[in-house]
Amino acid sequence: MVDLTGRGSLVVSGPDRVAFLQGVVTNDVRALAPGTGCPALFLTAKGKLRATLDVLALEECLLLDTEPGLAGPLVEGLRAYIVYPPVGLEDRTASTGVLHVEGPSAAAILGAALGPLPAGDRAHGPFSLGEIEGRIVSVSRGGEPGFDLRFPRESLPALRERLSRLGLSPASVGLLDAARIEAGLPRWGSELDQSVLPNEAGLQLGAVSYSKGCYIGQETVARLKTYGHVNRFLCRLLLPSGSAPAPDAAVLAPEGNGQGKTAAGRIVSAVDSVRLGRVVAFAWLKRELAVAGQPLEVFTESGPVHAEILLPPGA
């Protein structure tokens, strides 16, 4: 159980909410039935990231979940495209509590207390536990089965206590972040920022619809799919245990003649994984060097170490 209170929570309302969001984000909002959701991206006109988000469809509105610190910029960015007819856009981040439960037993423990759980990625529905009511969303944030519980923020202490009594162990955001890196799930503010094209980080695999029609940045995304290629990929590397490199540490590859080293990329984030017995790192690598079996070397505090490349999510 991890306290993720502070995640951005926006509500898009009005009869034209679906048409509006369909025209500004990358995924097919029109295809969502109430109780379902999808990941999506908000891009610049040149196809680079402005925000990552989840869109959750309710009967009366659309709920947008986004990373901490992105709610304000996302509201400002979306409002620039609201013309006529008007669409309601409300920031409920300050009044929303979020507890995330993840792990092999998450569904069994929560199901025993709450009843049937939403099934399917980003599926969601109401929940109640005693006097506390909210919405539960099926979403993995660390590679295991997981659920967000969203509720009025004033209920945070009471709900945390009730969930602890069910046998859910409180855990740190850092532990969840380590699991996320192990699972190869890039996140805004760590691996993702405004310089990233979706295809560089593999985000087009789940957050982009190629059949929905026009949206902001769509021309670049479609051109990359049809004609072009990106110059770098976000990849995971495996390094020896105890050798976690610092952010921006250099990644090198042998020169073609075998007589020297060439710059291959840089480390973005890394974690010493107790579960795997290895260091797992995210790194930006040049496209031509992001290939299986490519020998790589990473500089750490203890000197250069060998790195094994794992291609997803970028390649």
Image (cartoon, rainbow, N blue to C red):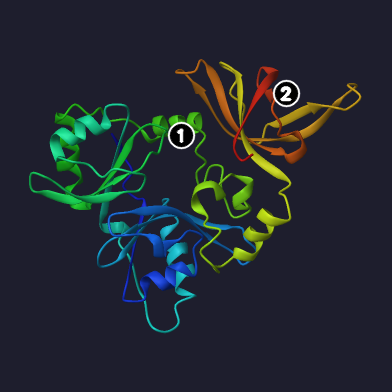
- Which quarter of the rendering shows the C terminus? top right
Report the residue at 53% width, 42% height from top.
190
Q: Amino acid at mark 2?
A: Glu
Residue at 44% x, 30% y: name it. 179
Q: Position of residue 47 (x, y in %)?
A: 62, 60
**To which quarter of the image does residue 105 belong?**
top left
Q: Residues within 10 Å of mark 2 (few under 14, many from 20)?
A: many
Q: Position of residue 20 (x, y in %)?
A: 43, 73
Q: Is residue 180 above or below residue 75?
A: above
- Residue at (41% x, 34% y) in the render: 142
Q: Nearer the viewer, residue 281 or 35?
A: 35
Crowd rating for badge 1 (residues with CA inside 10 Å; few <14, some 14–19, many 20+): some
Q: Residue placed at 52% from the left, 34% from the top?
A: 184
Q: CA distance from mark 1 to mark 2?
A: 23 Å
Identity, as a three-letter code, of the amino acid under mark 1: Arg
The mark tally for this picture is: 2
Helix, strand or loop for disc 1: helix
Q: Is residue 202 above or below residue 222?
A: above
| Apparent side of residue 209 relative to residue 120 in the rendered image (left or right) | right
- The disc at residue 297 is 2
* Residue linked to disc 1: 180
Q: Secondary structure at mark 2?
A: strand
